[in-house]
């Protein structure tokens, strides 16, 4: 991850994803750090949401981008599937979770250091 060498991770769908329990979710998710930029603090993760995941509305200080690789995801009330790209501006309240149909796998790129704030309705 240094000296300008590219970072290539093959077989994303088969990678082991350790469990994590962020405060936004009602159950553990699979989460694996793919890249951390030492200069900007940008963080890239591979994430698997289990089927029927409950999530709270939240916001992040930095913008972030999601690319759905497998399954379906609900994004601000809209169901999207594999091959979907979504970009979320910094500071905007949002909601994303899996659907009840099954798990979903996606890459999420935070354009700076990760933080999260729950947004009360």
Image: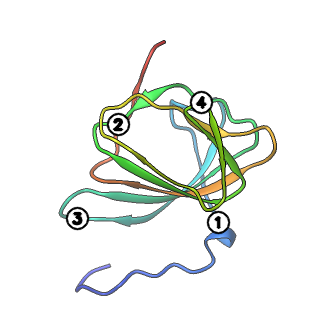
State which mark lies toward you, 3 or 4.
4
Callout 2 secondary element:
loop
Q: CA distance from mark 3 to mark 2?
A: 19 Å
In the image, what residue occupies the spot 51% across and 78% down? 9
Q: CA distance from mark 1 to mark 2?
A: 26 Å
Of residues 6 and 63, the one nearer the viewer is: 63
Q: CA distance from mark 3 to mark 4?
A: 30 Å
Labelled disc at residue 38:
3
Residue 6, given in percent of the width and then of the height, sits at 35, 84
The residue singled out by tag 2 in the image is 60
Q: CA distance from mark 1 to mark 3?
A: 24 Å
Residue 60, given in percent of the width and then of the height, sits at 35, 36
Callout 3 secondary element:
loop
User: Dot 2 surroundings within 10 Å: few (below 14), some, or many (20 or more)?
Assistant: many
The residue singled out by tag 4 in the image is 55
**In the rendered image of this protein, does residue 68 appear above or below residue 34?**
above
Of label 4 and label 2, which has the lower sequence position? 4
In the image, what residue occupies the spot 41% across and 28% down? 93
Labelled disc at residue 16:
1
Tag 1–tag 3 contact (CB < 8 Å): no
Callout 4 secondary element:
loop
Q: Is residue 18 left or right of residue 5?
A: right
Of residues 32 and 121, the one nearer the viewer is: 121
Of label 3 and label 4, which has the lower sequence position? 3
In the image, what residue occupies the spot 81% across and 43% down? 101
Which quadrant of the view contains residue 75?
A: top right
Of label 3 and label 2, which has the lower sequence position? 3
Tag 3–tag 4 contact (CB < 8 Å): no
Tag 1–tag 4 contact (CB < 8 Å): no
């Amino acid at each position: 991850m240094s000296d300008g060498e590219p970072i290539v991770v093959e077989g994303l769908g088969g990678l082991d994803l350790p469990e994590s329990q962020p405060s936004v979710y009602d159950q553990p998710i699979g989460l694996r750090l793919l890249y951390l930029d030492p200069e900007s603090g940008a963080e890239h993760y591979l994430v698997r949401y289990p089927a029927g995941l409950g999530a709270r509305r939240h916001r992040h200080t930095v913008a972030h981008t999601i690319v759905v690789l497998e399954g379906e995801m609900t994004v601000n009330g809209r169901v999207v599937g594999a091959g979907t790209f979504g970009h979320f501006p910094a500071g905007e309240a949002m909601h994303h979770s899996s659907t009840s149909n099954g798990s979903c796998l996606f890459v999420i790129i935070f354009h700076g250091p990760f933080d999260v704030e729950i947004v009360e309705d």
